[in-house]
Image (cartoon, rainbow, N blue to C red):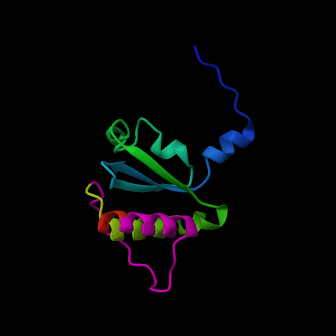
Amino acid sequence: MNVETFTTEHIEALARPCVYIFMEAGKPAYIGSSTEGIFRFGSPGHHHSELRTRSEILVFWLTKEWKRGIRQVEERLIRLLQPPYNKRMIYSPHPAWRFPAEIELFLDRYEQKKVA
C-alpha cells in the first residue's frame, strides 16, 4: 500500500487551468484544455482516456489570467500541430495573439525536432 498526504495547496495546484497534449511517438495525438486541471484529462470519463495508457502527457499549467483565453490557446495549438484525434472546427484567433511563453518554447523545440 502507498499512502500520500496532500495539502489544499497541492490539490489547488493540480486543479488550475491547463492545456494538455497526449503525445504518441513524440508527436501530438490529441490536444485539450481544462479550467479544472488534472480533473479533466485524468478523468476515466475523458473521451480520449484510452490515449493516456499509451501516451506521454505534456501539461502546460496556465496562470489564472489565462482562464478566459484557454480555449484560444488550445485551438491555436490544434491549428498549428494538427493532431489526428482533434476533429472539430478550429477557431481563428486575432493575428496579433500570442501563446504563453512556455508554449512558445515548446513549439520552438518541437519545430526543431521536426526539421532535424
Q: Position of residue 85 (x, y in %)?
A: 28, 54
Q: Position of residue 88 (x, y in %)?
A: 30, 63
Question: Is residue 67 covered in magenta?
Answer: no
Check the image and name the residue furthest to the front.
116
Q: Position of residue 32 (x, y in %)?
A: 42, 55
Q: Residue at x 39, y 63 (%)?
A: 110
Q: Is residue 101 above or below residue 53?
A: below
- Which stretch did the figure color magenta? 85-112
Q: Residue at x 70, y 32 (%)?
A: 6
Check the image and name the residue furthest to the bottom.
96
Q: Who is closer to the viewer here, 37 or 52? A: 52
Q: Who is closer to the viewer here, 114 or 99? A: 114
Q: Is residue 77 above or below residue 84?
A: below
Check the image and name the residue furthest to the top.
1
Count of numbered circles in the view:
0
Q: Who is closer to the viewer here, 110 or 61? A: 110
Quadrant containing the C terminus is bottom left
Question: Is residue 91 covered in magenta?
Answer: yes
Q: Residue at x 69, y 40 (%)?
A: 10
Q: Quadrant of residue 107?
A: bottom left
Q: Quadrant of residue 82?
A: bottom left
Q: Position of residue 54 (x, y in %)?
A: 33, 38
- Left/right placement of residue 35 relative to residue 112 reads right
- Left/right placement of residue 2 relative to residue 107 reads right
- Left/right placement of residue 73 relative to residue 115 reads right
Quadrant containing the N terminus is top right
Q: Is residue 86 above or below residue 11?
A: below
Q: Residue at x 52, y 77 (%)?
A: 98
